[in-house]
């Protein structure tokens, strides 16, 4: 075979693409036989510089992604035969391939010129694909941010709360963040009274009604008992005591339900309340409304056991209980509305005790003593609910809610001091108007001491201290009731 034929055969072989870095170079050699050196230099400068520059800045993740794209885009049945051996002493022609049989062939295939384009801005993960490209079983745990960790702790996930990149957020706990161990013990005691199958669902509804934290019911119960004892002038009728005591727990539960329903937009934004049943999604708003109406009907059934005057007053009480949760959207004085709602049991108690007499008038059933006690309760409720609102003041401001804690601002302690003085003066007037025994003022003195203790607790305005100050009002109300009972007993 002549050298000319060998060169022609080699030119035909060089048109077949071979794997490796020299893929496509044979075709380029053939085309170069018809291209002048100037055009070739221009073309090489345009085509070769850009890929090399791109490769220089590509991250390991980009290189790995390109290899995957090349493996998918390459034909599966491509086979390349090595070039035939050249006769000894034959010089390579102009169309002879550059890679000869003696040249080492690369073992790793490179992507063809028509491979898919891979972005070069993927994050550098030291050779590992980013989290969203990793298989679900091999994704590494990603620690929560500080805010998410605090939220997880408030939902019952104390400690080092962690989750995976594809995992769901931890479910909110069945207790709000301010539930104590004693409160949970009360809840467990109530659940033992129910069948086993009912307990999971009943737990959320009991938490919604705050049955695990009776302090709120007691804050409503004390002024009711104040009124019953003062209206009767002694131990009140037992049936009225039972009716009003049960009514207090029912109305307080109804108030908590409608409060959480109205605050379903606010509670998820507040650390202390985002674990509440409606905010956490364990109870639907519709179910909460049904429960609220049911509790109102039960409470109204108790009122029907009294007299007509008490029944008429109960409508105003239900309206106040419904209005309070929505007041924080429009006024900075929702605590005053709460005081009126909690204190409305006072005129109802006077009406129930005195309104049953024949030919009794409204003025006779609701004397000035009744309204003086009502004003004292409104002031007292404003004090303790302001302390309660100081716990969430920053979050309420961020969420757009209103309260007296926000209204008072940096003057909160001074204004609370003025309100405590007003409460003390009102309690003294109650004692003089009712002509109570001097032992009643022992209860007033205990109340003054507790007010001073509250001022000491909130001096730094710390959340835990403000909440502790709020809880001491349980003993303040009991001290006043004990003073009334002792004074009436000694008077007779």
Image: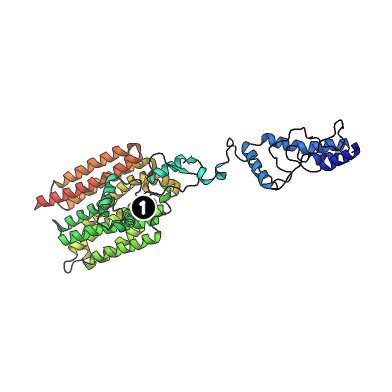
* Residue 424 place in picture, x, y as percent: 24, 45
* Residue 70 place in picture, x, y as percent: 68, 44
Q: Look at the numbered disc 1 and give the secondary structure of its residue.
A: helix
Q: Which image quadrant: the N terminus?
A: top right
In this rendering, the answer to whether 360 lies above or below 453 is: below
Label 1 crowd (10 A; few <14 / some 14-19 / many >=20): many
Q: Quadrant of residue 415?
A: top left
Q: Can residue 51 be seen in this view?
A: yes
Q: Is residue 401 visible?
A: no
Give the residue at mark 1: 334
* Residue 15 place in picture, x, y as percent: 81, 43
- 424 vs 23, left or right, is left
- Give the colouring mode of the picture: rainbow
- 142 vs 368, left or right, is right
In this rendering, the answer to whether 489 lies above or below 459 is: below
- Please state which of residues 199 and 253 is positioned toward the viewer in this rendering: 199
Q: How many numbered circles does the render carry? A: 1
Q: Which residue lies furthest to the left in this view?
A: 492
Q: Give the residue displayed 20% in from the left and 54% down from the top.
A: 225
Q: Which residue lies furthest to the front in this view?
A: 1
Q: Quadrant of residue 367?
A: bottom left
* Residue 348 place in picture, x, y as percent: 24, 61
- Please state which of residues 7 and 333 is positioned toward the viewer in this rendering: 7
- 471 vs 242, left or right, is right
């Amino acid at each position: 075979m002549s050298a000319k034929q060998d060169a022609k055969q080699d030119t035909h072989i060089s048109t077949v693409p071979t794997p490796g870095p020299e893929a496509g170079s044979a075709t380029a050699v053939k085309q170069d036989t018809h291209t002048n050196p100037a055009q070739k230099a221009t073309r090489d400068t345009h085509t070769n510089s850009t890929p090399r520059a791109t490769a220089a800045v590509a991250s390991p993740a980009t290189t790995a992604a390109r290899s995957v794209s090349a493996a998918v885009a390459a034909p599966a049945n491509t086979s390349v035969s090595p070039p035939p051996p050249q006769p000894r002493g034959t010089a390579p022609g102009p169309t002879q391939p550059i890679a000869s049989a003696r040249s080492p062939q690369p073992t790793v295939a490179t992507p063809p010129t028509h491979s898919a384009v891979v972005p070069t801005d993927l994050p550098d993960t030291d050779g590992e694909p980013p989290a969203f490209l990793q298989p679900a079983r091999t994704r590494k745990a990603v620690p929560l941010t500080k805010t998410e960790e605090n939220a997880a702790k408030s939902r019952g996930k104390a400690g080092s709360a962690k989750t995976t990149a594809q995992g769901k957020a931890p479910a909110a706990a069945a207790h709000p963040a301010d539930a104590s161990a004693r409160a949970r013990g009360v809840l467990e005691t109530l659940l033992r009274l129910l069948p086993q199958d009912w307990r999971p669902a009943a737990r959320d509804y009991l938490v919604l009604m705050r049955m695990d934290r009776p302090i709120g019911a007691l804050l409503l119960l004390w002024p009711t008992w104040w009124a019953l004892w003062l209206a009767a002038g002694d131990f009140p009728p037992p049936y009225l005591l039972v009716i009003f005591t049960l009514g207090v727990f029912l109305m307080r539960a109804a108030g908590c339900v409608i409060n959480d329903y109205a605050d379903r937009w606010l509670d998820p934004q507040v650390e202390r309340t985002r674990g509440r049943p409606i905010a956490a999604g364990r109870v639907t708003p519709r179910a909460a409304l049904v429960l609220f109406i049911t509790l109102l009907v039960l409470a109204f059934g108790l009122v029907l056991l009294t007299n007509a005057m008490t029944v008429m007053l109960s409508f105003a009480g239900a309206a106040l209980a419904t209005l309070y949760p929505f007041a924080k959207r429009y006024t900075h004085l929702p605590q005053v509305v709460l005081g009126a709602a909690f204190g409305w049991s006072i005129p109802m108690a006077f009406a129930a005790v005195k309104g049953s007499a024949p030919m009794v008038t409204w003025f006779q059933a609701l004397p000035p003593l009744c309204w003086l006690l009502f004003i004292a309760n409104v002031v007292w409720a404003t004090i303790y609910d302001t302390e309660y609102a100081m716990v969430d003041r920053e979050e309420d401001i961020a969420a757009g809610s209103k309260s007296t804690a926000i209204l008072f601002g940096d003057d909160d302690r001074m204004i609370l001091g003025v309100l405590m003085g007003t409460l003390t003066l009102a309690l003294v007037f109650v004692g003089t108007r009712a002509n109570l025994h001097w032992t009643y003022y022992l209860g007033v003195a205990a109340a003054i001491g507790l007010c001073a203790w509250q001022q000491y607790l909130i001096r730094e305005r710390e959340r835990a201290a403000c909440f502790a100050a709020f809880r001491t009002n349980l003993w303040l109300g009991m001290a006043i009731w004990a003073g009334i009972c002792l004074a009436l007993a000694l008077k007779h």
